[in-house]
Image (cartoon, rainbow, N blue to C red):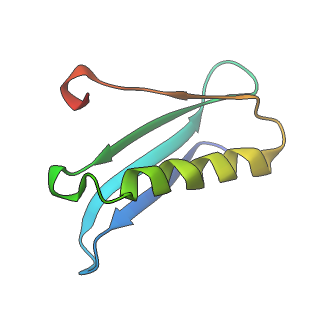
C-alpha cells in the first residue's frame, strides 16, 4: 500500500459504483483507519464484507500494522 490513502471500489454487475472503502494512516504508528460506505440497494449482498476483507489483507501485507480502526457515522449505523 502506498503512503496516504488506499481506495477500494465496490461495483454491481452492471459496473455501477455502489460502495467504497478508504484505508489510511493515522497519527499513531502501526494504526490504520478504515472508512466505508455501501449504498442502500447493495446492502446485504456481501459487498461490505468483501471490502473489509480486502482492506484487512492489504493492511496485513504491509507488515507494520497492528491495528485497523473502523469509523462509523451515526447516520450509517
Residue 31 visible in this rendered orientation of the protein: yes
Q: Is residue 52 left or right of residue 75?
A: right
Q: Of residues 54 and 3, which is closer to you in this image?
A: 54
Image location of residue 26, percent across then percent down: 61, 25
Q: Of residues 47 and 10, which is closer to you in this image?
A: 47
Image location of residue 35, percent across then percent down: 42, 36
Image location of residue 65, percent across then percent down: 76, 34
Image location of residue 31, percent across then percent down: 68, 26
Name the residue furthest bottom: 14
Q: Of residues 23 and 75, which is closer to you in this image?
A: 75
Q: Is residue 53 left or right of residue 35?
A: right
Q: Is residue 33 above or below residue 9?
A: above
Q: Residue at x 15, y 57 (%)?
A: 41
Quadrant location of residue 37? top left
Residue 1 visible in this rendered orientation of the protein: no
Quadrant location of residue 72? top left
Name the residue furthest left: 41
Q: Residue at x 39, y 51 (%)?
A: 48
Q: Residue at x 26, y 28 (%)?
A: 77
Q: Is residue 22 left or right of residue 72?
A: right
Name the residue furthest right: 63
Number of numbered discs: 0
Quadrant location of residue 46? bottom left
Q: Residue at x 56, y 51 (%)?
A: 53
Amino acid at each position: 500500500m502506498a503512503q496516504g490513502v488506499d481506495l477500494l471500489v465496490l461495483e454491481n454487475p452492471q459496473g455501477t459504483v455502489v460502495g467504497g472503502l478508504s484505508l489510511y494512516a493515522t497519527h499513531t504508528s502501526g494504526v490504520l483507519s478504515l472508512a466505508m460506505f455501501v449504498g442502500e440497494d447493495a446492502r446485504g449482498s456481501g459487498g461490505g464484507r468483501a471490502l473489509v476483507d480486502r482492506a484487512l489483507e492489504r493492511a496485513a501485507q504491509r507488515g507494520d500494522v497492528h491495528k485497523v480502526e473502523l469509523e462509523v457515522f451515526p447516520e450509517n449505523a
